[in-house]
Amino acid sequence: MKKPAWVIEKEKSRRAAASETLWLFGLHAVEDALKNPERDKRRLVLTRNAAAKLADAVAASGMEPEISDPRRFAAPLDPQAVHQGAALEVRPLDWGSVATRCAPEAGRGLVVLLDRVSDPHNVGAILRSAEVFGARAVIATQRHAAPETGALAKTASGAMERQPYLRVRNLAEEMEALKAMGYVILGLDGTGEVALDEGLGRFPPGPIALALGAEGPGLRDKTRETCDLIVRIPSSGAFGSLNVSNAAAVGLYAAHMAQTS
């Protein structure tokens, strides 16, 4: 019996995903990936100078690097990529599901939700802040969000190897799942009803999720409606605002302090 077209297409998509690779570049990103036992590593290209700097990480990984002339660097990177003589071909990390990664422990948990935040530099900076403040995961959508790329890894400066970054089909559905686990979801937006600190104080101690939207459009209507409360980061002037990565850092700090105080 001939398979339906949709089944054939789904199988093709699965095979394509199984063979997908990306190139990480830059000394910090490559070093942390080499040290990550969960990372499926395929090909390592280094200049002699980078090989000397990464000697311990290369030895620990068991990989045999290709030594390349820096003027004709062998890795297939964008010409504008600042690779510092180091590039590593890898498979994307599999962080598992929201249910397994975000389950609260001892009544605590901290999660970041990104609604259409597509700039890899912003997402990389958010991953760094999330790691610093102990977030269980950064959750973004499969579409209209920054994928795992070399540029994202370089901006994250190694955090991408340690900080779970989950891509989901439907953000609102995952928000409802987080609520069922006991999370309070606060949307960060300049139009917030109350200031961030006051909003955190309105709820009993427990796990917290912070939702942030792209600069300009902000949170989508469905995302706003699914939040428990929309809060704002107060400013001292009559105007001015933070970009999304800075807002995430401020929100994570405030939520972390609320959980540990």
Image (cartoon, grey):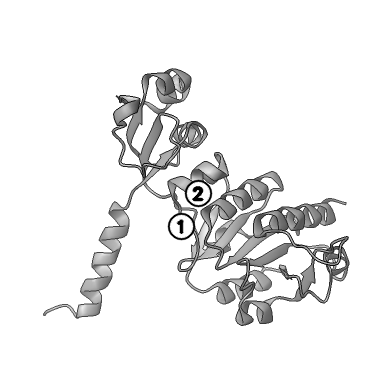
Q: Position of residue 139 (x, y in %)?
A: 57, 62
* Residue 109 visible in this rendered orientation of the protein: no
The residue carrying mark 1 is 147
Query: In this view of the protein, which residue sits in the foreground, 69 or 258?
Result: 69
Residue plotted at (35% across, 26% down): 70
The residue carrying mark 2 is 152
Residue plotted at (63% across, 82% down): 221
Secondary structure category for the residue under label 1: loop
* Residue 209 visible in this rendered orientation of the protein: yes
Secondary structure category for the residue under label 2: helix
Tag 2: amino acid? Leu
First in residue order: circle 2 vs circle 1: 1
Q: Which image quarter holds the N terminus? A: bottom left
Tag 1: amino acid? Pro
Residue plotted at (70% across, 64% down): 210
Relative placement, left or right, of 111 versus 100 is: right
Quarter of the image holding residue 227? bottom right
C-alpha span from label 2 to label 1:
8 Å
Q: Are marks 2 and 1 in contact (CB under 8 Å)?
A: yes
Q: Position of residue 88 (x, y in %)?
A: 38, 36
Q: Position of residue 117 (x, y in %)?
A: 56, 63
Q: Position of residue 207 (x, y in %)?
A: 74, 62
Query: In this view of the protein, which residue sits in the foreground, 136 or 105?
Result: 136
In the rendered image of this protein, does residue 191 appear above or below residue 239?
A: below
Q: How many marks?
A: 2
Residue plotted at (63% across, 70% down): 216
| Label ID, residue 68 | none
In the rendered image of this protein, does residue 86 appear above or below residue 14?
A: above
